[in-house]
């Protein structure tokens, strides 16, 4: 069953992290990575993710840094999601099959 994001910023983050599937195909893994990067760049306002932040703290760092911190804290809080992310990262950085790279030698 697909994870459905809720209305809150925290629920959206959790749904995004839980949708990481290391067993998915290479294009699906890359699509997920693009979605994560888009969320980090243009996701919800940081005070919705970390309500305890003061205005001074918010001004001290760019919004994507706060979003990245919220994502890392969510991974630290859930061991299952953390393990899935580790496996996904291994799959993303795995060397592609030899028939794709490097290109064949020409004689």
Image: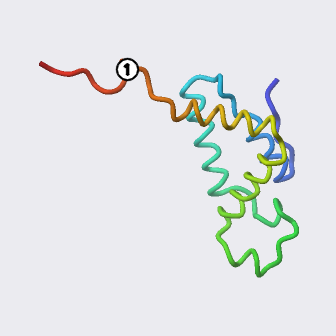
- From the viewer's perspective, tell me whether residue 51 is left or right of residue 20: right
Q: How is the image coloured?
A: rainbow
Q: Which residue is mark 1?
A: 98
Q: Is residue 53 above or below residue 65?
A: below
The residue nearer to you, when weighing 6 against 97, is 97
- From the viewer's perspective, tell me whether residue 83 is left or right of residue 40: right
Q: Is residue 72 above or below residue 66?
A: above
Q: List x then y, in percent, for residue 32.
A: 63, 37
| Outermost residue toward the bottom in this view | 56
Q: List x then y, in percent, for residue 97.
A: 42, 20
The residue nearer to you, when weighing 68 against 13, is 68
| Outermost residue toward the left in this view | 107
Q: How many marks?
A: 1
Q: Quadrant of residue 79?
A: top right
Q: List x then y, in percent, for residue 28.
A: 60, 29
Say which element carries label 1.
loop
Q: Quadrant of residue 41?
A: bottom right
The 10 Å Cα crowd at callout 1, few under 14, some 14 to 19, many 20 or more, is few
Q: Is residue 95 above or below residue 82?
A: above
Q: Quadrant of residue 86?
A: top right
Q: List x then y, in percent, for residue 23.
A: 65, 22
Please identify the quadrant where the C terminus is shown.
top left
Please identify the quadrant where the N terminus is shown.
top right
Residue sitting at 87 percent across and 66 percent down?
Answer: 51
Residue sitting at 80 percent across and 44 percent down?
Answer: 14
- From the viewer's perspective, tell me whether residue 29 is left or right of residue 99: right
Residue sitting at 70 percent across and 55 percent down?
Answer: 43
The residue nearer to you, when weighing 5 against 23, is 23
């Amino acid at each position: 069953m697909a994870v459905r994001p809720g209305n809150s910023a925290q629920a959206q983050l959790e749904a995004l992290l839980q949708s990481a599937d290391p067993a998915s195909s290479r294009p699906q893994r890359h699509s997920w990575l693009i979605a994560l990067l888009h969320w980090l760049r243009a996701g919800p306002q940081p005070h919705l993710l970390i309500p305890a932040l003061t205005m001074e703290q918010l001004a001290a760092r760019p919004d994507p840094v706060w979003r990245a911190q919220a994502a890392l804290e969510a991974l630290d809080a859930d061991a299952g999601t953390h393990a899935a992310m580790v496996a996904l990262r291994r799959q993303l950085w795995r060397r592609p099959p030899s028939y794709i790279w490097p290109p064949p030698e020409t004689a």
